[in-house]
Image (cartoon, helix red, strand yellow):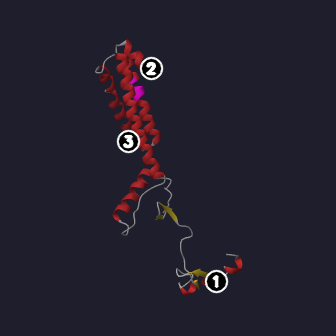
Amino acid sequence: MADAYREHVSDLGDMFMRTPSGGIVTVDTLARIERNSGPVMIDRKYLQRIVHVTANVAPTADLGAASEAVQRVVDNTPPPEGFAATLGGQTLEQQKAFRGLIFAAIMALALVYMVLASQFKSLIDPLVIMFSVPLGVSGVFIMLYLTGTKLSVNSFMGIIMMVGIVVSNACCWSTSPTCCAAGQALA
């Protein structure tokens, strides 16, 4: 509508509408028009309304601890019937990143084992070398605890790199020249 026809709320009542029978009536005969407050913008996803509640994490807190605290509040305060509450944003992205890193760690272990198996031409001998990985991982977690560092994407990537380094060192400390060559190939 032109500006002249929408200057006042009462102007909406003067609009004409066609009835199912073909007649023309004004809007104020069908509805009561009054000023009220409402959302400025309505977000939808899959035809469902979405309300975003956002917050910033305190500089001294980590995202994982803040997400756990918010999740506890959401779990202890169930939403009304017909509503659902979920965490998103950086929390969701962090969860996706950790799932990807867990997959990458499993793939790294599998690839290291396959390289060792091809070098040793045995499926059992590489297991002896691979037993050094749990010791390295436990050392990483002990140091993370002692330094007060939280498990993050960066530290998880360091764990994945540590797998190759630990296997390389374990191979070179063994007496087998084939193993040391395999360790150098992994490094």
Residue range of the region highlighted in magenta in the rendering: 163-167
**Mark 2 lies on residue:** 185
Give the overall secondary structure of the magenta segment. helix
Residue furthest to the bottom in view is 29
Q: Is residue 83 left or right of residue 54?
A: left
**Mark 3 lies on residue:** 145
Identify whether 40 is placed above or below 23.
above
Q: State the SS at label 2.
A: helix
**Mark 1 lies on residue:** 11
Instruction: Tell me, yes or no, whether the highlighted magenta stretch contains residue 8.
Output: no
Residue 143 percent across, percent down from the top left:
39, 37
Question: Could you give the CA–CA distance between mark 1 and mark 2, rounded to whole angstroms?
Answer: 79 Å
Location of residue 118 (image quadrant):
top left
Q: Residues within 10 Å of mark 1 (few under 14, many from 20)?
A: some
Q: Is residue 153 left or right of residue 139?
A: right
Pick the quarter of the image with the C terminus: top left
Q: How crowded is mark 2: few (under 14 residues within 10 Å), some or many (20 or more)?
A: some
